[in-house]
Amino acid sequence: MGKVIIGATMSLDWFMSDRTGDVSRLYPNLLALHETEMLQEEMRMTGAVVMGRRAYDMAQGDFTDYEYQAPIFVLTHTIPDTVAKGENERLRFTFVTDGVERAIEQARAAAGDRHVTVVGGAQTAQQCLRAGLVDELHIGIVPVILGEGLRFFEPHANEQLQLERINVFASPTRTDLWFRVVK
């Protein structure tokens, strides 16, 4: 069985977006990031994706060129009236309204021996961490200071979380730190 991995990109001051919700400064060259061996390996190893509704909505209805071509399980309170573009034989959407545990359970079943990657939101990541569902954190640090916005880690939210560094990837535009969650 694959691992449950949270993938997140944030600023040096640990923000996942600025105060307006904009993430563009964290992804100055998305095409170059897609071409890195690190992300290519993550895409190959991902068998399913779990994301929050805000991350789904940020795609503005179009997943045509989405890097993870795998089943996507969207945590939501309400199912949208229309499904985003981009579904194909590999990428399909399932909207999960009965909690993060159920979303991870469904994603694990879809992923088989490959990993479940949790993307696109501090709330979704925090829910997974609090429920003890996460095996690894893959955190990309971009050398910008946002000053305020949406934090990945809220103060005291994960006081008991113990991590062990397992890998570091450095590139000119970011540093990626991989941690195993010590259970």
Image (cartoon, grey):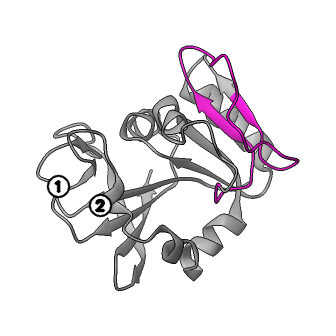
Pick whichever, 26 or 122, lies toward us. 26
* Residue at (24, 38) in percent of width and height: 20
* Residue at (54, 37) in percent of width and height: 60
The image quarter in which residue 24 lies? bottom left
Q: Indicate which disc residue 48 carries.
A: none
Q: Main secondary structure of the magenta part?
A: loop
The number of numbered discs placed on residues in the rendered structure image is: 2
Residue 77 in the image: state x and y as whole percent: 53, 15
Q: Indicate which disc residue 146 carries.
A: 1
Residue 150 in the image: state x and y as whole percent: 25, 41
Relative to 86, residue 106 above or below = above
Residue 54 in the image: state x and y as whole percent: 46, 32
Residue 159 in sight here: no
Q: Secondary structure at mark 1?
A: loop
Q: Secondary structure at mark 2?
A: helix
Pick whichever, 87 or 155, lies toward us. 87
What residue occupies the far right of the structure in this picture? 89
Q: Which residue is mark 2?
A: 25
Q: Is residue 67 magenta?
A: yes
Relative to 96, residue 60 above or below = below
Q: Label 2 amino acid?
A: Arg
Q: Which residues are magenta?
A: 66-94
Q: Label 1 amino acid?
A: Leu
Relative to 171, residue 157 above or below = above
What residue occupies the far left of the structure in this picture? 147
